[in-house]
Amino acid sequence: DNPPVPDDDIVPPGAAKLTLLTNRLLTPETKDYDRDIRHYEFEIKGTPVSYKTGDSLAVWPRNDAKKAEEFCTMMGYDAGQQLQVVPTEGARNWCPQELSVRQLFTHVLDVFGKPNKKFFDTLSLFAKDEKEKAVLESIAANSDEGKAVYRDLVHDFAHHADVLQKFCSARPPIEHIINMIPTLKPRSYSIASSPLMHPDMIQLCVVLVDWEVESTKELRIGEATGYMRQQGPGATLMCAVRASAIVLPKDPQNPVLMAGMGT
């Protein structure tokens, strides 16, 4: 498997490549404490990235390589196959013009994200089993039966891969799936450092998102926080600074009413 483009050269529109300097667990590793809160540091020296107090850092996640490989196997795709993608007018997704099937499902498409109603509607066109086709159409039509099925899927936090596993007679080819599943979206985290004290780096304090699927008791990890937790110093992550919606007064003597919520 020799992909036509290196992994770190697949850069989403608007993103910049930042090097991770530190990934340090802040919470105790004991059974009595189940929250995973981490301190991250990104190097911005020598990059066009800068930040102001109150800004946030958007981080583009990547899908777990093993899970993406399993998805390709389930769908009957050759993970090592090289693709040439020709952008069409009105295409909903960005995509590199050259990449491998594996890179498409690790770096570009949100395979493990929540599907919308349009996904079920389009998927019904590829269902070969009539019962599965009818259920998919009922979800798209928002019928009483479809609402019940959709409610159960939402309750279990079903993602695109879950739905494709459930409706196994529906196997869209890659040229269709690339427009059915949206691209991975960045998650924004409040920057914890001050540019006056740390002008050459961005620091974050991030809590791992996790939950249990009630029907299967499977523990699942948030897409972005799980990806970040796996990265070590020296790793390259795709990031962008987002401006704060709140602008502090220029005069530091002016009073400010603040509310602190969350972790």
Image: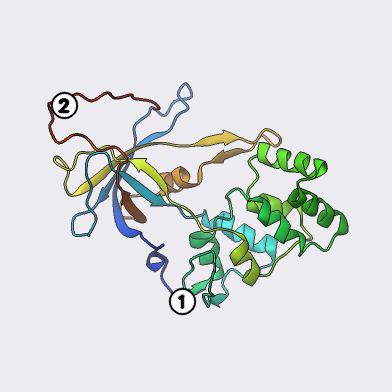
Disc 1, SS: loop
Q: Tell me which amino acid carries mark 2.
A: Asn
Dot 2 and dot 1 residues touching (CB under 8 Å): no
User: At which x and y percent is residue 60?
Assistant: 42, 53
User: At which x and y percent is residue 231?
Assistant: 39, 50
The type of colouring in the image is: rainbow
* Closer to the camera in the image, 182 or 66: 182
In-image side of 98 versus 156 (left or right): left
**In the rendered image, the vertical position of residue 233 relative to residue 35, given as above or below:** below
Q: Quadrant of residue 39?
A: top left
Please name the residue that numbered disc 1 is placed on.
Answer: 4
Count of all numbered marks drawn on residues in the image: 2
* Closer to the camera in the image, 12 or 118: 118
Picture residue at 69% right of the left edge, 63% below the top: 75
Circle 2 residues within 10 Å: few <14, some 14–19, many ≥20: few
Q: Tell me which amino acid carries mark 1.
A: Pro
* Closer to the camera in the image, 165 or 88: 88
Picture residue at 50% right of the left edge, 46% below the top: 223
Q: Earlier in the sequence, mark 2 or mark 1?
A: 1
Please name the residue that numbered disc 2 is placed on.
Answer: 254
Picture residue at 29% right of the left edge, 46% below the top: 243
Distance in Å between CA atoms under marks 2 and 1: 56 Å
Residue 218 is labelled as none
User: At which x and y percent is residue 104?
Assistant: 53, 65
Circle 1 residues within 10 Å: few <14, some 14–19, many ≥20: some
**In the rendered image, the vertical position of residue 66 relative to residue 229, given as above or below:** below
* Closer to the camera in the image, 259 or 63: 259
